[in-house]
Image (spheres, rainbow, N blue to C red):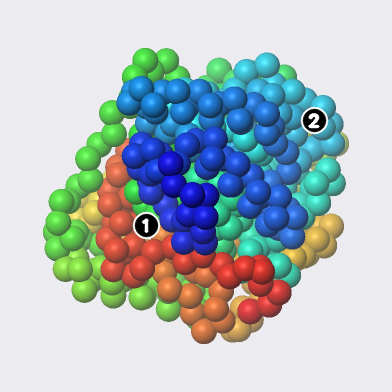
Amino acid sequence: MSDLTGFDEAFFAAPARVWRDALRRRDFSARELFEALWDRVLERNPPLNALIGWDESSALRAADESDKRLARRDGLPLDGLPLSIKDSFAVTGMPTTCGAEELADYMPEEDALAVARLRAAGAVIFAKSNVPRMTGDFQTHNALFGATSNPWDLSRSPGGSSGGAAAAVAAGLTAFELGSDLGGSIRWPAHGCGVFGLKTSWSQVPMLGHIPPLPSIKLKNPPDLGVAGPLARSAGDLELALSVIAGPVNASGPAFLAKPRRRRPGDWRVALWLDPNFAPVDAEVEQGVLHAADLLREAGARVEPAKPDFAFAEAVEIYALLNFAIGFAGAAPEVKRRAAEQAGGSFWLALRARAARMDAAAYAQLMTRRGAMKQAFADFFQRHDAILCPPAPCLAIAHDLTPDPFERRLALRSGDLAYHDLLKWACLAALAHLPAVVAPVAPGPSGLPRGVQIICPYDEDRSALALAAVIEEAGGGFRPPPFPFGTGA
């Protein structure tokens, strides 16, 4: 066994695969790794408030079981890796609150299916990461646990709803994380904290045991738009996590995952999509996307401006109506009536009002229009392998707890945007059920992290991961935030 002084800053900034390989070499035990990580959590979590619940004793028992397997040389894929889990997934032994006061005492009787797969693969699950109430915000804060801060700048949010997850990964408080994404909830925090995040193809990873919906509601079919996926410090770690959690509900073994479309960087055909008129982004965000495009070109890929044959504005309209309609599911008639009456004032309020009034006929028409967009994406991916575009219009934003989110604004150098414009670049992959990876690129002049979004065809998650790995290798990949954590950028 090595001395515990080996658990230094470089180690905790390293990918989970480095931790796993060292465990398999028996450089240290799973117990020693967890104890070193736990000391780090006790020191570094308080200013972040990324992790909000834990079970140290169960984690130590799980680490000891991993050590027994590793000593016999029959370790499982994730044996000994300590993981935190977004507090929207049921985890036995810990409350699962989803940031909601009414769930403060909810103790699940079984793990969410994706969590159960991680545990069965040997992961040492020890903590829950903070979320906005019912995962319903682009910032991470709730009445139970308060706000989570960004490790790069404590005056800023890490994003949401997987904000605690992204902050924990960036700060080296977990090997990787399990998050979820309906409207950028993995991708926006990954961009804001400088980590990798995968929004999986819809239905690639089961959502059983995820909140919302409330635990009392049992859905017959997977919820539309929403997916589970990992956040990590490398593209390879995303693939490692995906190989464990992917597969249908009744899967009895590892899922089949389609191989990447191309083997060599020079074979990739990548579309570059920016839209400064309808979906403007901050100059640092745009420069980050263009930098990623240059890295791919330097690796030999063909990168050219192109987009699918549909109107971006129509995609946002359809997605927003679906998203808001999902939010109204199970809502009291009075809640929907009040929303339906707030049609004036903004683009996003008008869409929410339409969603509150939507009937079966309008929904069917919406599905027809959505089907045409899915086909447009499919046709486009006959000519291109991937789309390179922004993950969000801005870098990490200052904490803003203005009660009405429709009154919040995003500050860009070129002018303010509506808060819900965070949905624009996020909605494209979600609407069409496509996989999308956010990969970090070098920080811009502000020093804040930034990322690029890579969208690929349905069920080709590993193609998005392969391109993220090319960018990672060419551009240096994850950069850890300095400690003590930032107080301004």
> For mark 2, does the 10 Å Cα neighbourhood hold few (<14), some (14 to 19), or many (20 or more) residues?
some
Mark 1, other Cα within 10 Å: few <14 / some 14–19 / many ≥20 = many
- Image check: 451 left or right of 338? left
CA distance separating discs 1 and 2: 36 Å
In the image shown, does 426 or 210 lie closer to the viewer? 210
Q: Residue at x 19, y 55 (%)?
A: 383
Q: Is residue 463 left or right of residue 228?
A: left
385 shown above or below 458: below
Residue 368 visible in the picture: no
Q: List x then y, in percent, for residue 384.
A: 23, 57
Residue to which mark 1 is pinned: 454
Instruction: Find residue 303 and report its horizontal and vertical position in percent.
Output: 24, 69
Earlier along the polypeptide chain: callout 1 or callout 2?
2
Q: Secondary structure at mark 1?
A: strand
Where is residue 223 drawn, in percent x and y? 55, 30
Three-letter amino acid code of the residue under disc 1: Ile
Q: Nearer the viewer, mark 1 or mark 2?
A: 2
Residue occupying the point 81% across, 51% down: 146
335 or 482: nearer the viewer: 482
In the image, residue 291 sits, relative to residue 349, either above or below, namely below
The N terminus lies in which quarter of the figure? top left
Give the x, y percent position of residue 8: 51, 59
Disc 2, SS: helix
**Quadrant holding the C terminus:** bottom right
Do the CB atoms of the residues marked 1 and 2 lie less than 8 Å apart?
no
Q: Which residue lies under the disc numbered 2?
A: 103
314 to the left or right of 149: left
Answer with the quarter of the image where residue 474 lies: bottom left
Q: Is residue 154 visible?
A: yes
Say which amino acid is labelled 2. Answer: Leu
